[in-house]
Image (cartoon, rainbow, N blue to C red):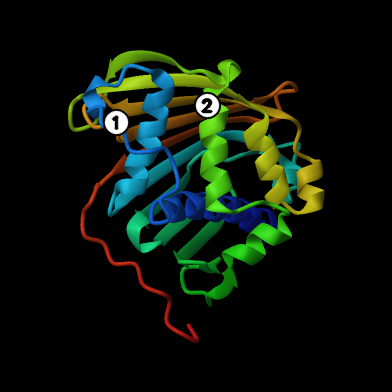
Amino acid sequence: MSVKGPLLGMAALVVVVGCGVVIGGPLGVGPLAATMPPDQVTDPREMVSRSLQSVLDASALHVEATVDGTVPGPVVDRPDGAVSLDGTTITADIKPRDLRTQASVTSDPLEIDLDAVTVWGDVWSRTAADGPWTKSSLGSLAADASFDANPLTLVDRLRAYISESDHGPTTADVACAAPSGTCHRLVFDAGADLSDLLAKVLPDANAAALPEVTTTVALDTDAKTLRPARLVLDMTSANGSVDLHIVIDTSRWDEQVQIEEPPQGS
């Protein structure tokens, strides 16, 4: 069975949200820079905002993610009642100030090998390591999904979201792999918002098979710098057909990395 349609829809979600965050930095969008040193911030909501700001301010960072759990088969064009995504991995290099990203998604259960490169508003993708690149635009991906990709509204919406009392994070200090060795762990309930966003970028038939999903977010952010070290998303549906555990780790902050457009005609 082909997974090209839903796979590219999920990739579109990553591209739209990722580029919205990336573009936000150079445009001066996002939480206002505060004068208080990061290690003196005590308000959990400000910790989340400052953690986002640290990504916008970085010259480069590396992201590695793993996905485990199950989804309904029709969501990924499979006849099975449930499909395991165990072993699915995502790696990405991001250059916020240069508006460039490069990412790879691999999944043995779904036989997926996807590469994507973004440079400003252009997006290249290919579904095989030696396959041809397909070029599109961030604007077209967002329009196809009826999704507002304006970085101004994306980042502002996130700030407003975490300021709501229902989504106020709890916090605890934990040992972590961040340079300081200690992180503030911020946990909050994101409700069904993330699954609603995913449904927008999936083909209609696949989105129809996606039940309402609630998401719990746990962010570990370095207590010294407030740079995010790990983000964990637990996504579940009431009927148990969706049960996903997604772990995203960051590293290689501000290291030199080259991200170039794929060669023409490749």
Q: Earlier in the sequence, mark 1 or mark 2?
A: 2
Q: Number of callouts in the render? A: 2
Of residues 21 and 153, the one nearer the viewer is 153
| Residues at discs 1 and 2 in contact (Cβ within 8 Å) | no
Q: Residue at x 51, y 42 (%)?
A: 155
Local SS, label 1: loop
Q: Residue at x 51, y 20 (%)?
A: 188
Q: Is residue 238 visible?
A: yes
Q: Residue at x 62, y 36 (%)?
A: 194
Q: Is residue 245 visible?
A: no
Q: What is the quadrant of the N terminus in the image?
A: bottom right
Q: Residue 226 bears which disc, if any?
A: 1
Q: Position of residue 123 (x, y in %)?
A: 52, 67
Locate residue 239 relative to residue 136 in the image: left or right: right
Q: Residue at x 72, y 60 (%)?
A: 144
Q: Is residue 157 above or below residue 27?
A: above
Local SS, label 2: helix
Q: Residue 46 bears which disc, if any?
A: none
Of residues 66 and 260, the one nearer the viewer is 260
Q: Position of residue 205 (x, y in %)?
A: 81, 50
**In the rendered image, which quarter is residue 181 located in?**
top left
Q: Is residue 63 above or below residue 162?
A: below
Label 2 crowd bin: few (<14), some (14–19), many (20+), radius 10 Å: many
Label 1 crowd bin: few (<14), some (14–19), many (20+), radius 10 Å: many
Of residues 71 and 53, the one nearer the viewer is 53
Q: Amino acid at mark 1?
A: Leu
Q: Position of residue 235 (x, y in %)?
A: 60, 28
User: Circle 2 is placed at which residue position?
Assistant: 162
